[in-house]
Image: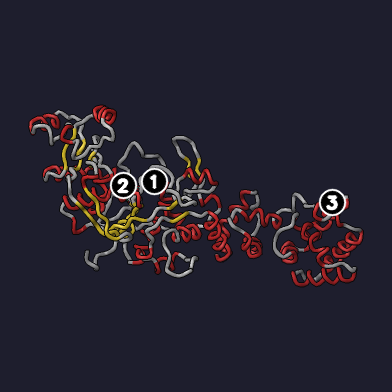
Amino acid sequence: MSDQKRVRVRFAPSPTGGLHLGGVRTVLFNYLFARHHQGDFILRIEDTDQTRYVEGAEQYILDCLSWCGLIPDERPQSGGEYGPYRQSERKHLYAQYAKQLIDNGHAYYAFDTPAELEQMRNSVANFRYDHSSRTQLRNSLTLSADEVSRLLEGDTPYVVRIKMPEDQVVSFTDAIRGEITFETSQVDDKVLLKADGMPTYHLAVVVDDYLMKITHAFRGEEWLPSAPVHLLLWEYLGWKDAMPQWAHLPLILKPDGHGKLSKRDGDRLGFPVYAMNWLDPRTGELTKGFRELGFLPQAFVNMLAMLGWNDGTDQEIFTLEELIEKFSLDRVSKAGAKFDFEKAKWFNAEWIKRLPVDELLPAVKNVLAQHNVTHTNDAYIEQVLRLVHDRLTFINDFWQQASFFFVAPQQYDLDAVKPRWSEQKTAYFNKLATCFEALQSWDAAGLETVFKELAAEDNLKTGEVMLPFRIMLVGGKFGPQVFDIAALLGKNKTLDRIAKALTLIRE
Ligand code: GLU
């Protein structure tokens, strides 16, 4: 492949359900590679398997990509020079290539009915349609040419299968794994064209990667066993020189490192595996997503980038721009990457701390709206955010950490103050309320000075009155610096809360 060729990569999902985080990582690596090389990133919907097609799955994939900010340059919705981008709409393109392969002796018609194949499977242990069994089956290699023509003309259902060579060794150089070699006798004669006229993945991926001028193809490691079939198809179709550079990405593993992370692991261990909530229209089952749990797209993307890639330093926090600049395939590891939910949460907390508050505002307003708080001005929310953002793991934690800034506490942790309460403290807080009332200006430093001076006058240690003051304002033993809270709440609310809590404490 010449170096001048414009880089073109594709993400090629099948619309069969929710988008696993491994899928989003494949999107991300495609996107980073394309942007790094000023190339094109294509979304191609591989919907040739009508039996697995799920309504809404394509839109869901697009929504996930938009949420992550990884927008393809060419996609079914907006089209492009190499469309259509849905394989079902390209159905008419594939048969000619299947025919070409048959004419060249690299593929054949197989007329075996599903029932016949089922019978073979039941009677022959580990039955495979391959070089050893095809000689005993009903196909254009065993039937006479006349019989084949008669069957084809009579509209007998058939599939087209690749004729895998019996004893050839094929190899290619994977951009991550280096040279990989296969023995063709180990591979069965995969179906290329199905009885409904649709291509299988094997034929469609090769034809479309060719027609769409894909230069680099990144896909999960689970596709490695299919590589010899694809390699031979590129060769048999006469396109070998145009074959994309393949990179089989490492698996994302279960937290214990044993096997591929599945949706079921997420259910079992209590964390999401899908990018966004996915409601399966067939079963009504809802699978939770990272977005709805309160992940920021920046954190989700950053976390995914680090699953199998690093820039060679200890740096872990990267913006998308930095990732684009630094991404290279030679730093993608061969080994599977263990998924660690605690680490994923750390990325989110870091991103919440780092993002300017105005960027967090929409998500926070969403959280507030869920709790029926809608009439608050943005400037106030931003001030609250500045005080609490380093305490949030998820955006949704905002309510738990900051609800008292918007509504008075519903409950007070009185057990934390009552046992050590005294009339001296009642007197102190009454005096404090009077002094606060008289203040001309209302800021944290001023409040702290008054608070401490009064405590000293009353021979109270600051610590003895600080916790009760916090509980009066917040309801519990948490939250930012107490004078910052009072300053932001304002005079009226602070005085109201002191008065209300004093009554409760003394009840
Ligand atoms: N349609 C395949 C999938 O859903 C795509 C594999 C590839 O990228 O070649 O995983």
Q: Type of residue at label 2?
A: Arg
Amino acid type of the residue that numbered disc 3 sits on in the rendered structure: Leu
Color encoding of the figure? secondary structure
Which mark is drawn over residue 198? none
Which is more N-terminal, label 1 or label 3? 1
How crowded pointer 1 is (Cα within 10 Å; few <14, some 14-19, many 20+) is rated as many
Q: CA distance from mark 1 to mark 2?
A: 10 Å
As drawn, 482 above or below 129: below
Viewer-closest of 156 and 59: 156
The yes-or-no answer for disc 3 within 8 Å of ligand 1 is: no
Whether residues under marks 1 and 2 lie with C-beta atoms below 8 angstroms apart, the answer is: yes
Quadrant location of the N terminus in the rendered image: bottom left
Residue 504, numbered label:
3
* Three-letter code for the amino acid on which mark 1 is drawn: Glu
| Numbered-mark total | 3
Q: Residue drawn at (50%, 41%), measured in percent from left and top? A: 286
Q: Which residue is mark 2?
A: 86
| Of callouts 1 and 2, the N-terminal one | 1
